[in-house]
Amino acid sequence: MQWAWMPVMFAVAVILGGPQTATAPTKMTHLIAQMSGTDIPPDSFASKPKVFWRASNQYCRVDEEPDPANGIHGRMIINEPDAWLVNLADNTAKHMVDPGPTFNCRLPIFANDPETLKTKIGELEFGRELEFFQANGAELVEGPKLEFKADYYELRIGDSVLRLVERSDVHVPIMISRVRGDNVTVVRYSLWDDQVPFEADFFAKPTGVTTEEVH
């Protein structure tokens, strides 16, 4: 299988992190995000929305749109210490076991840039957006008036300016942007819900696929 964005996410999600939560979660975060920007052509596969689920430090899942041109329909499932990279187009999967000693899946927002992953910005994750901005001293700034009350957070890290737009009445992110010189990347959320009842089946071992073990 030929993969672009998802294999990097796959590696990061199971290699980096902290201690796994022992208690089974009762809620999970479900979100849909779509990226655009200077280096993302509007009609490209990279511009298509992706669907994410995460719960505690143990469970992560990402579903991509079909990519017929490359024969790929990607799905990533993390149930620490197990992880599967699934191609629904041909019913194949790659299975990896996290060697530890810590187990913590991650969903970095800027996973398509390996150099960024090595920096503080690599710690900005889907499902934990506001926590990152607050923990790193983001400032509240003025922004355009919207049809709902919104808070604008701005954070400078290195040569990048990050901005988070949060719908303040429900504390839900609706947009994140990164400006680095002339390069702009924007993440727009069409769904963000952290009160979804946890469903273990979302993170279960995939069935009906031919699995290759990755060591």
Image (cartoon, rainbow, N blue to C red):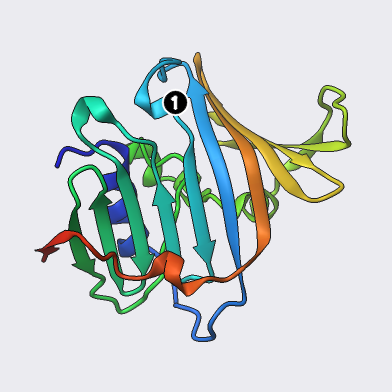
Residue located farthest toward the bottom when viewing the structure as drawn: 23
How far across and how far down the image is residue 79, in percent?
Answer: 37, 70
For the C terminus, give its image quadrant. Answer: bottom left
Vertical placement of residue 121 versus 82, above or below = above
The residue singled out by tag 1 in the image is 47
Does any portion of residue 161 appear in the rendered image?
A: no
Q: Report the residue at 37% width, 20% height from top.
A: 44
Toward the viewer: 139 or 197?
A: 197
Q: Is residue 127 left or right of residue 91?
A: right
Secondary structure found at label 1: helix
- Give the image quarter of residue 25: bottom right
Residue drawn 31% across the image and 74% down it: 81
Amino acid at the residue labelled 1: Ser
Residue that appears at 49% across and 86% down: 22
Q: Position of residue 19 (x, y in %)?
A: 44, 77
Along the viewing direction, whichever of 200 and 95 lies nearer the viewer: 200
| Residue 10: image location, x then y, percent | 30, 53
Residue 151 is left or right of residue 57, and the answer is right
Q: Residue 89 sits in which quadrant?
A: top left
Q: In terms of depth relative to the viewer, which is nearer, 126 or 1? A: 1
Q: Which quadrant of the figure contains the N terminus?
A: top left
Rendered position, 14 above or below 34: below
